[in-house]
C-alpha cells in the first residue's frame, strides 16, 4: 500500500507572532492549561519540565533548580522567542539576587529574552504603580514566612499576609475557586493598592475578575504576570479579557 502525500498545501506556521518557552516544575498541572486558554492568536507556548515532587521544602527546591540549565537548553533548541522561568518559590529559597542573576544568565547563554515569576511580578507592580499590597500564598508556613521580608527589603509595604499552608506540592493545583475566593476575602486589604497571589501552580485565571470585584483593587497572580511580561517581551500587547486590570493597563 502506498500513501499519497499532498505537498501542494502550505504547512501551518505555529507562533508567527511569538513562541513562548516555559520552564515548569513537574508538579505544576496549572500553568500550561491556563496559558492555552487565553493565548492571543498567533502566539504558541512550549513547556519543558523540571522534576519537583513530594513536599515543598528548601531541599526539594534546591534539587529542582539543578535541572534548570537542561530545561533551558531544550527550550532554546525549540526556537522560542522568550523563556519564562515559571517558579516563584526559588526567589525566597535561593540566595539574594539569585533570580535576577538567573534571568540574565539564561538570556546571555541562549541569546533568548528571559523573564521569571519574580521579574514579571516586579514589573507588573511597577506598571500599576503599586507599592503597598496584601499578600497571599499557598506555601507551607515556614516558606511563606520568607516572603514578607523579601518584599519589605525591596521597599514594598504589606497591609497583611496569609497562607493556605499547603505542604504537598501536588495539592496546590487542587485549590478550588470557592476556597480561593474565601481566602482572598480574608486577606487584610484595607489600604492595599493590590492583592498579590503567589505560586505558578495556584489556579486563578477563571476568577481574576471576580476576585478584583470582591476586593476592589487589582489582583496579581504569578501566571498572569508571567504571561503579561512574556507577551510584552514579544511585542504582543493584546488586551486579554478576564485577566484583570493588569491586561487593561
Image (spheres, rainbow, N blue to C red):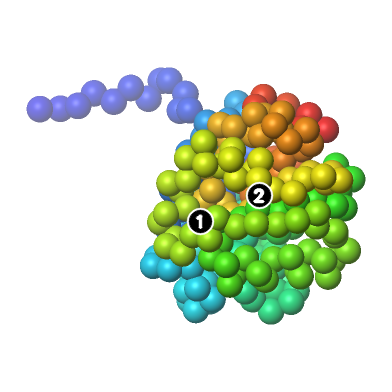
In the image, is residue 102 above or below residue 241?
Answer: below
Residue located at (67% from left, 29% from top): 209
Residue neighbourhood size for the residue with mark 1, other residues' Cα within 10 Å, grouped as few (<14), some (14–19), many (≥20): many
In the image, is residue 122 above or below residue 244?
Answer: below
Of the image marks 1 and 2, the number of the one nearer the N terminus: 1
Give the secondary structure at mark 1: strand
Q: Do we see residue 127 in this rendering?
A: no
- For residue 98, which numbered disc appears in the image? none
Q: Which residue position is annotated with label 2?
A: 197
Q: In front: 84, or 142?
A: 142
Residue neighbourhood size for the residue with mark 2, other residues' Cα within 10 Å, grouped as few (<14), some (14–19), many (≥20): many
Task: Give how far apart the Cα atoms at labels 1 and 2 are.
Answer: 18 Å
Residue located at (70% from left, 74% from top): 98
Q: Residue 205, percent across and down?
A: 58, 35
Q: Which residue position is annotated with label 1?
A: 24
Q: Residue 223, percent across and down?
A: 61, 46
Residue 88, quarter of the rendered image: bottom right
Classify residue 37 as left or right of residue 228.
left
Q: Residue 132, percent across and down?
A: 85, 52
Q: Do we see residue 178 in this rendering?
A: yes
Image quarter (top left, top right, bottom left or bottom right) of the N terminus: top left
Residue located at (83% from left, 33% from top): 249
Q: Is the residue under label 2 in contact with that under label 1 (CB below 8 Å)?
A: no
Amino acid at each position: 500500500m502506498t500513501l499519497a502525500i499532498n505537498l501542494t498545501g502550505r504547512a501551518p506556521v505555529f507562533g508567527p507572532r511569538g513562541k513562548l518557552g516555559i520552564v515548569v516544575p513537574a508538579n505544576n498541572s496549572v500553568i500550561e492549561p491556563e496559558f492555552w486558554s487565553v493565548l492571543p492568536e498567533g502566539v504558541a507556548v512550549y513547556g519543558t519540565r523540571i522534576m519537583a515532587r513530594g513536599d515543598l521544602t528548601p531541599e526539594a527546591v534546591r534539587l529542582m533548580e539543578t535541572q534548570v540549565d537542561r530545561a533551558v537548553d531544550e527550550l532554546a533548541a525549540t526556537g522560542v522567542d522568550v523563556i519564562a522561568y515559571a517558579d516563584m518559590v526559588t526567589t525566597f529559597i535561593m540566595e539574594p539576587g539569585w533570580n535576577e542573576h538567573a534571568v540574565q544568565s539564561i538570556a546571555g547563554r541562549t541569546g533568548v529574552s528571559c523573564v521569571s515569576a519574580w521579574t514579571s511580578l516586579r514589573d507588573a507592580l511597577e506598571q500599576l504603580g503599586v507599592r503597598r499590597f496584601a499578600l497571599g500564598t499557598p506555601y507551607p508556613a515556614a516558606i511563606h514566612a520568607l516572603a514578607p521580608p523579601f518584599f519589605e527589603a525591596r521597599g514594598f509595604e504589606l497591609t497583611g499576609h496569609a497562607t493556605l499552608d499547603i505542604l504537598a506540592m501536588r495539592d496546590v493545583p487542587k485549590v478550588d475557586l470557592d476556597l480561593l475566593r474565601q481566602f482572598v476575602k480574608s486577606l487584610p486589604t484595607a489600604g492595599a493598592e493590590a492583592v498579590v497571589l503567589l505560586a505558578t501552580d495556584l489556579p486563578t485565571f477563571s476568577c481574576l475578575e471576580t476576585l478584583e470585584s470582591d476586593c476592589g483593587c487589582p489582583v496579581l497572580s504569578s501566571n498572569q504576570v508571567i504571561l503579561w511580561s512574556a507577551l510584552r517581551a514579544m511585542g504582543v500587547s493584546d488586551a486579554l479579557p478576564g485577566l484583570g486590570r493588569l491586561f487593561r493597563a
